[in-house]
Image (spheres, rainbow, N blue to C red):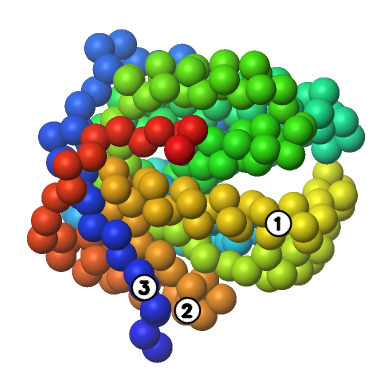
Amino acid sequence: MQTPVQTFVQPTPHSEIARTPAQPPTIAAGSGPTRAKQAPDVFGNIFIGIAGMIGAGKSTLAAALGQHLGIDCYYEPVADNEYLQDFYRDTARYSFAMQVYLLNRRFQQHQEIIWRGRSAVQDRTIYEDSIFAKMLADTGLMEERDYRTYVELFRNMSNFMCKPSVIIYLDVSPEASAERIRTRSRDVESSIKLDYLRALHDGYEEFVASISKVIPVIRVDYERFATAEEMAEVIKREYLDISFLRQVTRFDPAR
């Protein structure tokens, strides 16, 4: 079966991916990678970010790719997120704290991936946090001053971030997202409404259009996705068959 893919081709130079900070970052408990026994040289040194809606299947694909390619796998911090229940209970009150917490944890993960200098796949990228922060601000659930502080913090942190080699965007409809949330039955997600997911999907569309000017994006209709082996071949084909550069070097979360 052929996987439908829409590719945005702005490659990140491997020299940038391989650059490492002078000192290893402090790693939060539970944020380190799971690692397969052996890492075959499939792409050289590659940093794959997986993006997508709530319930899109990011963790499932990350685990499958990590196992199939024999590379480190980093998961989104959910089980030990001490703000999650409060955020869903009183979103307006905890929106800023929640977004700063997630930004900090994902920055730790991001820097660990770069510092270790090994191929890795990450379940949800640091760049996606900006979608949720913007939505919260647009809907009045985050104060404007808090949002401005968040954007400024992200921009300052981005000066120390090396971009992923490629982002895999799992494109699922808001309705499919709602069904997957219902199926996996996480109590903290029970209050998520379809209107919220529709707004989130719109945010992801804007995100993909923007981030693809900075990082190559492979867009996949995940509802028709078959196997990790097939996905690995798609990534290899699309990532290695890049023929031009766009002169954009920075992602702006406020745009």
Residue at left 37%, top 24%?
158
Structural crowding at the residue carrying mark 3, measured as other residues with C-alpha within 10 Å and reported as few (<14), some (14–19) or many (≥20): some
Which mark is first along the chain, 1 or 2?
1
Q: In this view, does 126 lie above or below 207?
A: above
Q: Distance of mark 2 from mark 3, alpha carbons?
A: 13 Å
Q: Which of marks 2 and 1 is in front?
A: 1
Q: Where is residue 82 in the image (x, y as percent from the top left)?
A: 75, 26
Front one among 35 and 53: 53
Q: Label 3: state its secondary structure.
A: strand
Q: Residue at x 43, y 69 (%)?
A: 220
Q: How many labels does the image show?
A: 3
Circle 1: element type: helix
Q: Where is residue 7 in the image (x, y as percent from the top left)?
A: 30, 65
Q: Toward the viewer: 242 or 116?
A: 242
Which residue position holds label 1? 197
Q: Name the residue under label 3.
A: 5
Q: Earlier in the sequence, mark 2 or mark 3?
A: 3
Q: Do the residues labelled 2 and 1 touch (CB within 8 Å)?
A: no
Q: Position of residue 97 (x, y in %)?
A: 70, 20
Identified by mark 1, the residue type is: Leu
User: Which amino acid lies under the numbered mark 3 shown in the image of this protein?
Assistant: Val
Looking at the image, tell me whether mark 3 or mark 1 is earlier in sequence order. Answer: 3
Task: Name the amino acid, label 2.
Answer: Ala
Q: Name the residue under label 2.
A: 226
- The extreme top residue here reads 23
Q: Is residue 90 left or right of residue 206?
A: right
